Image (spheres, rainbow, N blue to C red):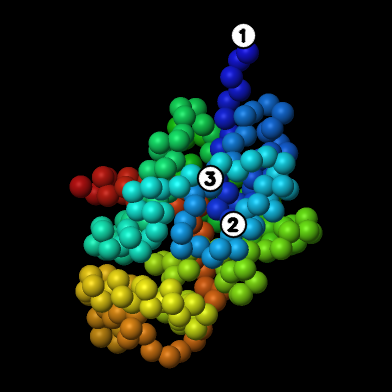
Amino acid sequence: MSVQRPRIVCQFSCGAASAVATKLALAQYSATHDVQIINAFLANEHKDNRRFLLDCQEWFGQEVVQLRDEKYGADIIQIFRRERFMKGRNGAPCTKLLKRRLLDAWKQPGDVMVFGYTMEEVDRLEDFRERNPDRPVIAPLIDSGLGKEDCKALIMRAGIELPYMYLKGYDNANCIGCVKGGEGYYRAIREDFPEQFEELCKVQDELGPGSYLHRNRTTNERFSLRDLGDGPIRRNEKIPSCSFFCEIAEHEIADQIILRNR
């Protein structure tokens, strides 16, 4: 009778960091573990992300298991309209409903998760491990001393074209119009992707002030994307990459803080 090998689970988010983390995990653990690669399909990402996934799949030499939400059509716009909010104290509903639930249904006891944290994010990894001592995680990028720019360079040296959003100047390949973005980021989205920007404006028109993402620095009042004024455009604004595990780590930390303060 064959003994089932322990699973190492890599979440490939169509970004450079998760791609290199996956490649390192395969190199380090495929001989001794069952290394799985999963991806959450999101309808609101740039279509070039699917091309990047196929290129990386060939580089990995292994299939990427693509998970897809059915309830909301893997669409953040449907999430916002049906759940009636875009971002709350504990983050965005799209992370929980389009990613976290998929992972919870798919994962198995004993899975070791691969986090795509880079050297710039050592504190985030340490924070997670401190708060979750019983959760086995590995961070191959940090172990190898790799930063975000290192990951981009390694992808290019492998002969793979970076995702379109990177080439356009954005810092990651998240959904077009990530609710974690600031004013400068949304000015860039308005300029580069006017259709997606208008779609988000319409959601805020329907949901009202509770859905507004930004505040006036003088009055401290929230304002809608339609009222976003002119100013600096920041395509490379630092926004957390939307992978399963990095996002879930942050949510679990936030949940623990809430429980402790009750």
Q: Residues within 10 Å of mark 2 (few under 14, many from 20)?
A: some
- Regarding residue 242, the answer to whether it shows in the image is yes
Name the residue rendered at 73%, 59% in the picture: 160
Q: Amino acid at mark 1?
A: Met
Residue 17 percent coordinates (x, y): 62, 55
Q: Amino acid at mark 2?
A: Arg
Which is more N-terminal, label 2 or label 1? 1
Pick whichever, 261 or 16, lies toward us.
16
Q: On the rendered image, what quadrant is the N terminus found in?
A: top right
Above/below status of 200 relative to 12: below
Numbered badge on residue 1: 1
In three-dimensional space, the C-alpha distance between marks 2 and 3, rounded to whole angstroms, equals 10 Å
Q: Farthest bottom residue? A: 230
* Left/right of residue 158 with respect to residue 148 in the rendered view: right
* Left/right of residue 235 with respect to residue 52 in the rendered view: left
Q: Residues within 10 Å of mark 3 (few under 14, many from 20)?
A: few
Quarter of the image for residue 131 reads top left
Q: Which residue is mark 2?
A: 50
How many discs mark residues in the rendered view?
3
Pick whichever, 154 or 61, lies toward us.
61
Q: Amino acid at mark 3?
A: Gln
Q: Residues within 10 Å of mark 1 (few under 14, many from 20)?
A: few
Could you say whether the residue bearing mark 1 is in a helix, strand or loop? loop
Could you say whether the residue bearing mark 3 is in a helix, strand or loop? strand
Which is more N-terminal, label 3 or label 2? 2
Above/below status of 203 relative to 20: below
Numbered badge on residue 66: 3
Above/below status of 156 relative to 212: above
Label 2 near label 1: C-beta < 8 Å?
Answer: no
